[in-house]
């Protein structure tokens, strides 16, 4: 218990010491506004010596506005133990046509340096940072825009949302030209949205859709936003579907049971861009569902929509004659493509048996054919009975 109290006391002392060190020097104001003016103006701030220490400071600037400093004192700023504060000033001048409308920030950096080792060697002790902000007005029409296109499935319509904020001087009509491009920058489709009025100092959005089924892949949207007599271009990459490579067929030339046999998988990329290091995992499954072997193909790179053969080597030295299923799996970025190939393993041949789906389709077709034949037979029997009945009625009348 005593040890816990001692540790807590030491922690409090350290915190108080640290806070005392941090507050030994300060700069006021930490943030200030500067007028947006093409006239030269003086900016001032105060360096505070709260603990009446001795210190040397170097003044510097950072940010886009730093190039508009027209006059500053490059000598070291000295505070003696008797100085409670020191006023620091510099001059700025902003050209009206070179500042971006909106908030612009100038960082004012006061770096304490150690001069004890000589004037030519300055080592940093601590740094104080203040900010001077210039709010540049928006002239004429000015719209701040952001483009959002979430990922989607191949059968879904792609939602394209342009968020808007009118920071200009009045209400303005906005509309957009939408251009969709593939990974090679080839244009796929373009359209223009309807115009809408964006009120003064209000927020709004343009929502439109790229409709219809699409191939999986990476796409790029280029949006030319019109507002009044001005335009701006927004660009964004988005994804449709998932990276996928499909296994279409398997062959094993010169198959011999007990040997290491080459297994060629015919595969096809359905992605519209390059895929690296694609390989297939093959599982050999017995009739009772047990995985008796597993092996991989050599990796390959695939161009957009490319078909290739992935080669794997199958050691059949411990395999018996019989029926098996070759389960193939290709995983890319967490998405897996799977296909099963039922096979018959003989001494010198690998035969591919019909899949369960094919058998099921075949049996369904047979059932449909049988049903059709029964219906025809029923119609024939019914027609025959009606003819016999008609004949006997006619015979009785005679």
Image (tube, grey):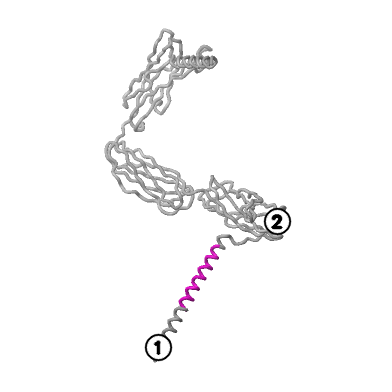
- Residue picked out by circle 1: 394
Q: Earlier in the sequence, mark 1 or mark 2?
A: 2
Left or right, 339 with respect to 179, comes to right
Counting from the top left corner in percent of width and height, residue 4 is at 53, 17
Point out residue 328 in the picture as x, y percentages from the top left corner: 60, 52
Farthest residue in the bottom direction?
398
The residue tagged 2 is: 320
Work out whether 219 lies above or below 325.
above
Occupied quadrant, residue 86: top left
Which mark is on residue 25?
A: none
Span highlighted in magenta in the image:
360-380
Instruction: Using the image as rendered, state which of residue 12 and residue 336 is in the foreground.
Output: 12
Classify mark 2: helix, strand or loop.
Answer: loop
Q: Label 1 crowding class (10 Å Cα cut-off): few <14, some 14-19, many 20+?
A: few
Magenta stretch secondary structure, dominant: helix
In the rendered image, residue 362 lying in the magenta stretch gets the answer: yes
| Magenta segment includes 80 | no
Residue at image coords 56%, 50%: 302
**In-image side of 389 versus 362 (left or right):** left
């Amino acid at each position: 218990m005593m040890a816990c109290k001692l540790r807590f006391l030491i922690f409090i002392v350290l915190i108080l010491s640290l806070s005392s060190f941090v507050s030994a020097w300060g700069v006021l104001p930490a943030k200030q506004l500067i007028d947006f003016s093409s006239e030269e103006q003086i900016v001032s701030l105060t360096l505070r010596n709260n603990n009446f220490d001795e210190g040397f400071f170097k003044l510097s600037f950072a940010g886009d506005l730093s190039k508009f400093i027209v006059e500053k004192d490059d000598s070291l700023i000295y505070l003696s133990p008797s100085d409670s504060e020191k006023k620091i000033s510099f001059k700025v001048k902003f050209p009206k046509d070179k500042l971006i409308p909106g908030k612009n920030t100038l960082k004012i950096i006061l770096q304490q340096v150690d001069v004890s080792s000589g004037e030519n060697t300055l080592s940093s002790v601590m740094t104080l940072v203040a900010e001077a902000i210039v709010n540049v007005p928006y002239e004429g029409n000015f719209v701040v825009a952001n483009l959002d296109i979430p990922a989607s499935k191949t059968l879904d319509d792609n939602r394209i949302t342009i968020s808007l904020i009118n920071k200009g001087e009045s209400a303005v009509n906005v509309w957009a030209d939408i251009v969709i491009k593939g990974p090679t920058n080839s244009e796929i489709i373009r359209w223009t949205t309807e115009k809408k009025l964006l009120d003064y100092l209000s927020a709004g959005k343009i929502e439109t859709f790229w409709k219809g089924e699409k191939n999986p892949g990476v796409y790029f949207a280029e949006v030319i936003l019109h507002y009044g007599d001005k335009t701006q271009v927004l660009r964004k990459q988005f994804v449709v579907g998932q990276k996928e490579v499909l296994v279409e067929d398997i062959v094993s030339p010169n198959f011999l049971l007990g040997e290491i046999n080459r297994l060629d998988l015919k595969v096809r990329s359905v992605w519209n861009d390059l895929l690296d290091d694609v390989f297939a995992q093959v599982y050999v499954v017995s009739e009772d569902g047990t995985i008796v072997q597993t092996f991989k193909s050599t990796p390959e790179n695939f161009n957009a929509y490319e078909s290739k053969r992935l080669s794997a080597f199958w050691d059949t030295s411990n395999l018996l004659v019989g029926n098996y299923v070759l389960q193939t799996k290709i995983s890319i970025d967490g998405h897996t493509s799977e296909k099963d190939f039922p096979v018959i393993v003989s001494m010198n041949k690998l035969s591919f048996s019909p899949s369960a789906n094919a058998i099921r389709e075949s049996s369904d077709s047979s059932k449909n054919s049988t049903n059709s034949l029964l219906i025809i037979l029923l119609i024939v029997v019914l027609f025959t009975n009606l003819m016999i009945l008609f004949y006997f009625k006619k015979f009785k009348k005679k």
